[in-house]
Amino acid sequence: MINDLTVVDEAQLLNAQARLDCGVRELGLSLSPQQIQACLMHVLMLKRWNRTHNLTAVSNLNDMVVLHTLDTLSVLPYLYKVGEMKTGQRVLDVGTGGGFPGIPLSIARTDIAVTLLDSNHKKTSFVRACVARLGLSNCDIVTSRVEQFQVKDAFDVVTLRALTHPVKAMDWSAHLLRPGGCLVLMLGKALDRREFDHEMYELTALEPIRVPKLSAARHVALVIRR
């Protein structure tokens, strides 16, 4: 499945797969071998495309596994615990970049529909190639600025990763998230709860999350649309 995408030697490939396998187990996720292979193929494609398209500052395959794939998947156990990401929900990944968190979420949760949104054409070209190669029938791709993106039916969940400021994220996503829907903000350092004050949203959770093999701080904020 991944032979024609190998951009590292066999030892590096096996090491990356072992790191991914171990990290998924540490997160308590039940992914099949096929799902783990799909996650690995995603980062291998990212590494290949990154040579000419400059999609990410991360160039080492092991670092991609940790800083992108496991970082994305680390939020899933928390979302299960608080009852988000139910079967059949529609999820919008704003600023998907190289497909994070949208592609790993769609691999792990084939029962949800994920839309990958980015204004950068080369990034949406990449994620479109990934979705086709991985056969992800629950993924859609849109090239647009979030402020200009319009939908008939609002989403149940909106995710943003590496955002600049929570209030800006809330402003950007308000027209895309249904009342009662959840805005999932994936953060680095902890923020003061007052930074989430917004007339259209209510902060319901702000918690640290642990990413296997990563010492840097990670947090998740869940904000409900009023």
Image (spheres, rainbow, N blue to C red):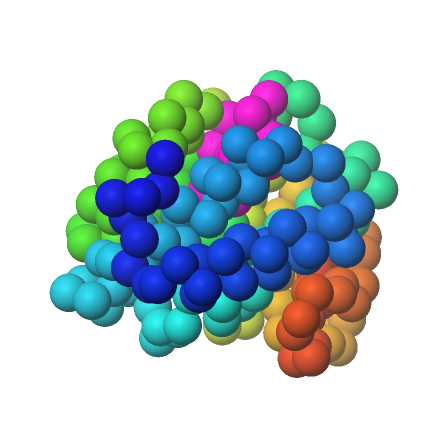
**Residue, far right:** 81
The magenta stretch spans which residues?
Answer: 103-114
Q: Is residue 120 above or below residue 179?
A: below
Q: Is residue 218 left or right of residue 50?
A: right
Query: Of residues 203 and 8, which is closer to you in this image?
Result: 8
Q: Residue at x 75, y 65 (%)?
A: 210
Q: Report the front residue among 31 and 200.
A: 31
Q: Quadrant of residue 194?
A: bottom right
Image point (25%, 44%), residue name: 4
- Would residue 152 appear left or right of 198 to someone viewing this image? left
Q: In this image, 49 relative to 44: left or right?
A: left
Q: Position of residue 100 (x, y in %)?
A: 46, 52
**Which quadrant would the C terminus be assigned to in this image?**
top right
Q: Is residue 185 shown to the viewer in this render?
A: no
How many labels sit on residues? 0
Within the magenta stretch, is there residue 38? no
Is residue 26 visible to us here? yes
| Quadrant in which the N terminus is drawn | top left
> In the image, residue 212 lies at what x, y percent?
70, 65
Toward the left, the furthest residue is 52
Residue 73 lies left or right of residue 162; in this view the side is: right
Foreground of the two, 45 or 114: 45
- Quarter of the image for residue 192 reads bottom right
Q: Residue 213 at x, y = what percent?
A: 67, 71
x and y percent of residue 76 in the render?
70, 46
Which residue is painted at 25% across and 64% down in the image? Answer: 50
Residue at 46%, 48% in the rendered image: 40
